[in-house]
Image (cartoon, helix red, strand yellow):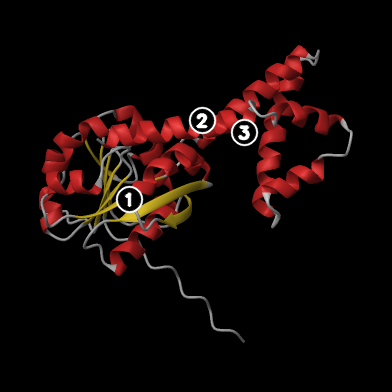
Amino acid sequence: MPAPTPAASPLPPILLVGCGKMGGAMLEGWLERGVRQAVVVEPQPASVAPFADRVTVCAGVESIPAGFAPAVVVLATKPQQAEAALPACAAFARAGALFVSIMAGKTVAGMTALLGGEARVVRAMPNTPAAVRQGFTAAFAGPGVTEEQRALADTLLAAIGEVAWLEEESLIDPVTAVSGGGPAYVFLLAEVLEKAAIEQGLPPELARRMARRTVSGSGALLAASPLDAAQLRVNVTSPKGTTERALNVLMAPEAWPKLMSEAIAAATARSRELAG
């Protein structure tokens, strides 16, 4: 008889600074995994209301309970609030807490300067499918982060989906463009499919249902299939058929592939601008 699978280790104490959409998605994932002690800093009561009976809520960093010693501090606040929030958390850095930041545009060096030289920082970029635990997060471990701390960060980020680790921090910028913004591009596809269906005479409600299910179902097939996306596309495309005629338009030299490359380049450039 096989040995029983050991239970997952409980998550250590967590301080979450910022509980917007992404912070809330992460917190929900940690609660599902049995975190026993979490303190959330969030000035907007409505944002943290769904968690109020399960975690300790503070309106500001100065209200964190005395004696609370988080093993990890997750920075999910807006980037423009970093200069106010990070120095107030410097004591946790001196005590050895790991910092995991999902703030766009804030570099490891910039955060370390605000937290103090002792800070150990992981920079991460998740995306919005985290809300249904189907996110993708790319992460970079800054100087001094131990293997144990990296494993802890991986566990926390895996609560909302798949995690990949980067060897170069500069790669966060194209990740932001492709993965961070990617859901918006997919939603745009559903939006324009719905509009095109209505233009061809389909009832609006049917067009909406069909566009949404086509996009979500295709994504599920892509996730489940071992085939490349290109091969899945070919499998749908009958020679001289209707799909081939449509793809001749979408894949023309100045059409979709070129526009997507330009869009990703523009988003990558903007991410670098935000990082300074």
Residue 71 position in % (x across, y down): 23, 59
Q: CA distance from mark 3 to mark 1?
A: 27 Å
> What type is the residue that disc 3 sits on?
Pro
Examine the image and state in which quarter residue 25 appears: top left
Examine the image and state in which quarter residue 260 appears: top right
> Can the viewer see residue 192?
yes
Give the residue pinned by disc 1: 169
Q: Nearer the viewer, residue 178 or 56?
A: 178
Question: Is the residue 151 above or below the residue 58 in the image?
Answer: below
> What type is the residue that disc 1 sits on?
Glu
> Are there few (<14), some (14-19), or many (20+) residues within 10 Å of tag 1?
some
Give the residue pinned by disc 2: 262
Q: CA distance from mark 2 to mark 3?
A: 9 Å
> What type is the residue that disc 2 sits on?
Glu
Location of the N terminus by quadrant is bottom right
Instruction: Tell me which residue sits at (78%, 15%) in the image.
Output: 203
Give the residue pinned by disc 3: 257
